[in-house]
Amino acid sequence: MADNAKGGIMQKRGFLKGTMLALAALTFLPGASLAQEITLRLHQFLPPQATVPKHILKPWAQKIEEATGGKLKIEHFDAMALGGKPGDLMDQAIDGTADIVMTVVGYTPGRFLKTEVFELPFMMTDPIATSKAFMDMVDTDLQAGEYKDVKVLGAWVHGPGVIHTKDPVNKIEDLKGMKLRGPTRVITDMLTELGAQPIGMPLPAIPEALSKGVVNGTVIPWEVTPSIKLAELVKNHVEFGGKEALYTATIVAVMNKAKYESLPDDIRAAIDAESGQKLSEFAAQVMFDYDKPGRDIAVKNGNSIIQLDETEVARWKEKALPVTQRWIASVKEKGIDGQATIDQARALIKKYGG
């Protein structure tokens, strides 16, 4: 009986050992079902309820995950959850702190000079056309140029920029001495030219700056105002009639270059299929669509919506001209033909229907 029991135990051990060896061998077979899931970390500065993470980045990531059949997982780290400041995001993508980041390009001033062309005063005529023009320029020039250290997944702009202030602005003179938050180098230069005192800061800092009186107002599009409850912090909002917007800001989703290139072909193909022009157009359209709900909150709150007429807008355009002239001069020092870049951007915007 003892020998039989001992023999049974030895048989079971042999079976288990054989099973373990077989499973181990399977993990090394091409297309094995036990292949490891790849996880990418996506880092960005907005709170999770904001339009971009909730209605753009997460649906985009989900489509990619589904296309890979569960081989890829994209983890979302909102509101700088991986640490650092919004201005660090581009470098985090470069050094691999995050695999993917979404950021406002102007949060790293002076590094992406050609991109700034889309932020020049009254350059944008339509956010969708301008976004497609931006991504077109990335594909043909900027990816190999100023974005050579990352892989650009999408490039877009937000809807028409709006001025939101505690005191009403009915004409250009009302800006004189007003402390306004500005997001980027080009836009703060524009605010200076218009007579305001610009203070550069990323979007998450706006509520505290307004509450403490550090600024008297800010420039941002309508779509993001609900996420920082701006309609409760200021009571006046200035819109610009006409074809061109006062300003817009450039936004990108970029990936660590080495990480992108290391991905299996099928995973990379799934990312590519949802990125580029597809992501850029989708993101721009979503942001533009969410301008109305943001505006509606301010209206419902009883805030004043000030719409400048064509005559007044023409005065702002003329006043802002030196901003473009200074930009042309500043990028020339870096070997960039600013006027040619402006002509290229305008031609691309027109190409895409702007």
Image (cartoon, rainbow, N blue to C red):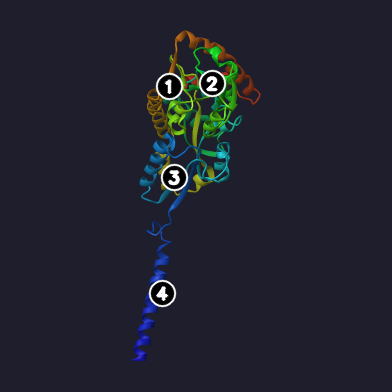
Callouts 3 and 2 close, C-beta under 8 Å:
no
- Whichever of callouts 1 and 3 sits on the residue coming sooner in the sequence is 3
Residue drawn at the location 36% of the way across and 86% of the way down: 7
Q: Earlier in the sequence, mark 3 or mark 2?
A: 2
Q: What residue is drawn where x is 58% and y is 33%?
A: 108
Dot 2 or dot 1, earlier in sequence? 2
Q: Are marks 2 and 1 in contact (CB under 8 Å)?
A: no
- x, y percentage for residue 329? 63, 19
* Amino acid type, mark 4: Lys
Callout 4 secondary element: helix
Q: Which residue is mark 3?
A: 268
Task: Look at discs 2 and 4 and give the one toward the viewer.
Answer: 2
Q: Measured from the top left, where is residue 140 in percent x and y?
A: 50, 30
Instruction: Determine which quarter of the picture holds residue 295.
Output: top left
Name the outermost residue toward the right: 333
- For disc 4, the neighbor class at 10 Å (few under 14, some 14 to 19, many from 20) is few
Could you tell me which residue is drawn at 35 percent across and 87 percent down?
5
Amino acid marked by disc 2? Leu
Mark 1, secondary structure of its residue: loop
Residue 303, numbered circle? 1
Find disc 4 in the rendering and name its residue: 17
Task: Name the mark nearer the viewer: 4 or 1.
Answer: 1
Distance (Cα) linking label 4 and label 1: 74 Å
Residue 339 against residue 211 in the figure, above or below: above
Separation of residues labelled 3 and 4 (CA atoms): 37 Å
Residue pointed to by mark 2: 120
Q: Quadrant of the N terminus?
A: bottom left
